[in-house]
Amino acid sequence: MNNELTVTFAANVATTVKAITTAALPRETGGLLVGWWDLGTVFIKDAVEVVDPEATSVGWSRHQETAQRILDQTLEQIAHPWLGYVGDWHSHPKPCPPSDTDLRTLAQSSLQFTNPLILLVHAPPDTFEVRAAHTGQSCSPYVQYRTLQIMAD
Ligand SMILES: [Zn+2]
């Protein structure tokens, strides 16, 4: 699967992540990526925040119970059968690429899923780094941004 994975972001995702990140500065924040998989492509429709009340400028933790509650609420609001959890995102207010810990966590978490898991790291103002892992193996996906339409069913 390496080098064959494409990650397609809806154009609004970068704007949403920037707005959430800016509101949280100088602390890190992060959350979940919601989308769907189809034929070697992960489509990312939206990003939501999972607030960590103990976040610092160099650390944000994804609290599992809060994350699950926010995911359930989000999916209920969107109400589309294709959509589900496809990965995580967080910000690095002190600009730096995804850390070794970020990548290890991503690889480890990907063992729980059949499909590739995505990590988006946003360093303000305009850096977006995307990584993926599948069954414990990291890979660098091809990334694109466009307007995503989901057909009504
Ligand atoms: Zn990080």
Image (cartoon, rainbow, N blue to C red):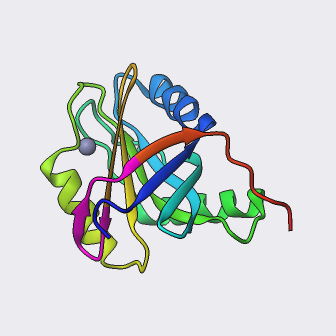
Left or right of 132 on screen, residue 50: right
Q: Residue furthest top?
A: 125
Q: Residue 109: x, y in percent?
A: 31, 70
Residue at left offset 54%, top offset 39%: 145
Q: Residue 126: x, y in percent?
A: 40, 22
Ligand 1 falls in which quarter? top left
Quadrant containing the C terminus is: bottom right
Kindly tell me whether residue 116 is visible in this rendering.
yes
Q: Residue furthest left?
A: 100
**Magenta stretch prevailing secondary structure:** strand
Depth check: give the residue in front, 150 or 15: 150
Q: Residue 13: x, y in percent?
A: 56, 39
Q: Is residue 86 above or below residue 55?
A: below
Q: Is residue 137 magenta?
A: yes
Residue 26 placement: quadrant: top left
Magenta region: which residues?
Answer: 133-142
Q: Residue 2: x, y in percent?
A: 28, 65
Residue 134 placement: quadrant: bottom left
